[in-house]
């Protein structure tokens, strides 16, 4: 008995290679410490960078009386409905041999997650600022009372990077 199927090309090697390459790709959202220098109003460089400040805001610092104000993890989670679809498209493009199309979908997912994190920073909800913090802002002429939104220095450092593990 003869089979009606005939193999004309073996693509398993290429498929395996695409799956392996895809499994090593990552999109990371946050504040890369190497690019997070914080400049003070007077132009001097702050001793604390934006990566450290973001970590303190996300997790709090009881020793410094700073409450948790999680924005990064919840912001990324809020974007998952959109980014999961983009990662699915990225996978399909990679399996079809379109690595640049895959990278474009990763870029879209990164930008979407960054936007969601910034939206979370602006919207909260977060514990209110201490009276001392509001007074310090007022002395600098800042009227905003929103936690995490002062000079926009921290927000401007939220980004994404594509890495291969």
Image: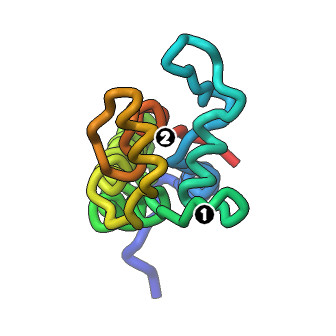
Of helix, strand and loop, which one carries label 1? helix
Residue 95 falls left or right of residue 34: left
Image colouring: rainbow
Residue under label 2: 160
* Residue 109 visible in the current orientation: no
Residue at 54% across, 65% down: 67
From this viewpoint, which residue is outermost toward the top? 43
Q: Position of residue 45 (x, y in %)?
A: 64, 18
* Residue 94 visible in the current orientation: yes
**Residue 16 numbered mark, or none:** none
Q: Position of residue 105 (x, y in %)?
A: 36, 45
Q: In the rendered view, tell whether residue 135 sits above or below residue 12.
A: above
Q: Nearer the viewer, residue 103 or 40?
A: 40
Residue under label 1: 59
Of helix, strand and loop, which one carries label 2? strand
Q: Position of residue 26 (x, y in %)?
A: 57, 50
């Amino acid at each position: 008995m003869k089979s009606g199927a005939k193999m004309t090309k073996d693509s398993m090697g290429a498929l395996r290679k695409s799956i392996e390459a895809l499994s090593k790709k990552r999109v990371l959202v946050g504040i890369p410490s190497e690019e997070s220098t914080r400049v003070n109003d007077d132009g001097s460089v702050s001793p604390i960078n934006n990566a450290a400040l973001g970590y303190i805001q996300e997790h709090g610092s009881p020793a410094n009386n700073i409450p948790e104000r999680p924005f990064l993890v919840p912001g990324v989670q809020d974007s998952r409905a959109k980014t999961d679809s983009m990662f699915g498209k990225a996978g399909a493009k990679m399996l079809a041999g379109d690595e640049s199309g895959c990278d474009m979908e990763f870029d879209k997912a990164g930008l979407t997650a960054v936007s969601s994190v910034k939206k979370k920073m602006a919207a909260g909800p977060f514990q209110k600022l201490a009276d001392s913090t509001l007074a310090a802002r007022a002395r600098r002429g800042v009227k905003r009372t929103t936690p995490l939104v002062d000079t926009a220095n921290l927000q401007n450092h939220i980004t994404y990077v594509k890495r291969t593990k």
